[in-house]
Amino acid sequence: MAVPPGVSEQDFKRALERFARVVGTEWVFTSDDDVALYKDAYTPLWNEAEERVASAALAPDSAEQVQEIVRIANEFRIPLYPISTGRNLGYGGSAPVLSGSVVLDLKRMNRILEVDERNAYALVEPGVSYFDLYRYIQERKLKLWIDCPDPGWGSVIGNALDHGAGYTMNPYRDHFGAQCGMEVVTGGGELVRTGMGALPNSRTWQQYKYGYGPYVDGIFSQSNFGVVTKMGIWLMPEPECYLDGNIECFGHDDIIPLVDHMSYLMNTGVQNTGTNLQSPLRFALAQDADLRSLLTREDAQAAARLSDVSRQRNVPIWSNTFKFYGPEEVVRAQWAYTKRRLASITNSRAVEGAFYRMPLTDEQKRTVRDEQDLGLPSLGVFSIGARSAFNPTPTTGHLGFSPVIPMTGEAVIQSQRVFSRVLQEAGRDVAANVFPQSYHPRTFVILIMFSVMHDVDANQQTRKLFRRLIEVAAENGWGEYRTHSAFMDDCARAYSFNNNALLHLHERIKDAVDPNGILSAGRYGIWPKHLRRS
């Protein structure tokens, strides 16, 4: 049995006995087979000394049990690593940032405590997945939708705390933006309710975010300041209809007016959701080495050549999906206005898309193209790298490099050129590997996907390239919004204004709310004071 760093074997055994009295012996996991389940299945550190491993795991059933565990951990200085469902694949999974930590597995705390149809909110525990909440709503025939990220088995609370995002209407697709009210166990074992929840017998805990005094909910996201045991989440009222359509453009610089129009429509509410901006030509050039080299060039001749190829092949350089939710007469008017506005882009064309009336039939749910756009949880994202007719040698996982850039066409062009050059220097694909997502109203998130292998050399090269991308992004004023645990320190260092003043503030908060530094050491680059030098 492994022992947490800085803890004697005798003290660890005594702590485990105390933990067992709180949660029950069957919910304390110490065997090699059980603890191995808490490794990161998508780790880029596979079979290396730096691979993150737990020493044990505990599965409490209530906030009160979490409090007791935290108090015992403080007494013995046992580092804890809370997880919700442990399915944060691509970002570290259930493995602790600090090897030897005891995983605090909250999967048994999976109660849906309240769903209010009239005010469109839910109050849930951390073990509640998107599948769970969706099933609860469907069984009761409530006219509510979840907003789901790519994997539907993840935790509603866990995804929000990591600033995850989805695909439906703007108030809901920013999952932390849609949270309202938390219950938190701090590093000292104190139970706190934020916002209106601090008022005994509150009637508006899940309706009004701010409560009275400073708004503190944000410090518990992407941090290690407490264990969130309950959280409110706003749900989307079921719309009457859904409609989408594509605008396709064939000029290299058409991306500039396309994004300007898109941004206007989004920020005025004409389009009340995100979009799906793609470059079909980049994918089409994946097997054309001569033309692919144009993607990293900045000269006018390269841009003109790409425009010519786009028109000759009838493959748009840029394509954007506009999506609308609401009454039929409204969404059809919104799409008509969008087409009329975008017609000002020379040689662009509008392509009609999908239209659905709600509620969806069972057949529609089985055959719909983009499930998350319609509030349907899915596991389709795990087809990335999976074995298929096109990929007979699957990978063992994936990572996403995800910096935030301005929502302008110029920024899209610049980021694609900058990152494509870095990828090219490393001998990686530059054609289809850089694309923007509009998870938030005024920015894009650039996603560059990497495969994870059971190959030490390949993973080391990927990590080296990933860190180079972090550096290059920071040089251009772009920072990641979220990252795998293997790169959390690198990303934290990139936010370096005034000698990393923000990180130092995080550390002072850490010292105040978790003085013994027992919670999630190193998460998002925030280390307790006794580990900072090492």
Image: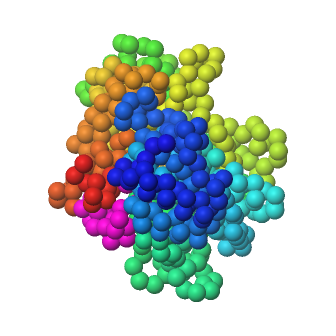
**Looking at the magenta stretch, what is its main secondary structure?**
helix
Q: Is residue 317 above or below residue 273?
A: above
Q: Which one is in front, 205 or 5?
A: 5
Q: Which one is in front, 166 or 72?
A: 72
| Residue 434 appears in view | no
Q: Which one is in front, 377 or 238?
A: 377
User: How is the protein colored in the picture?
Assistant: rainbow
Image coordinates for residue 195, horizontal then vertical, percent: 50, 78
Q: Is residue 86 above or below residue 247?
A: below
| Residue 532 appears in view | yes
Image coordinates for residue 448, horizontal then vertical, percent: 42, 34
| Residue ID at (62%, 86%) | 201
Image coordinates for residue 446, horizontal then vertical, percent: 41, 41
Q: Is residue 374 magenta?
A: no
Tell whether 254 sits left or right of 356: left
| Residue ID at (56%, 21%) | 394
Tell whether 337 sits left or right of 4: right
Q: Is residue 514 magenta?
A: yes
- In this rendering, the count of numbered labels is 0
Q: Report the magenta residues as a range.
A: 502-521
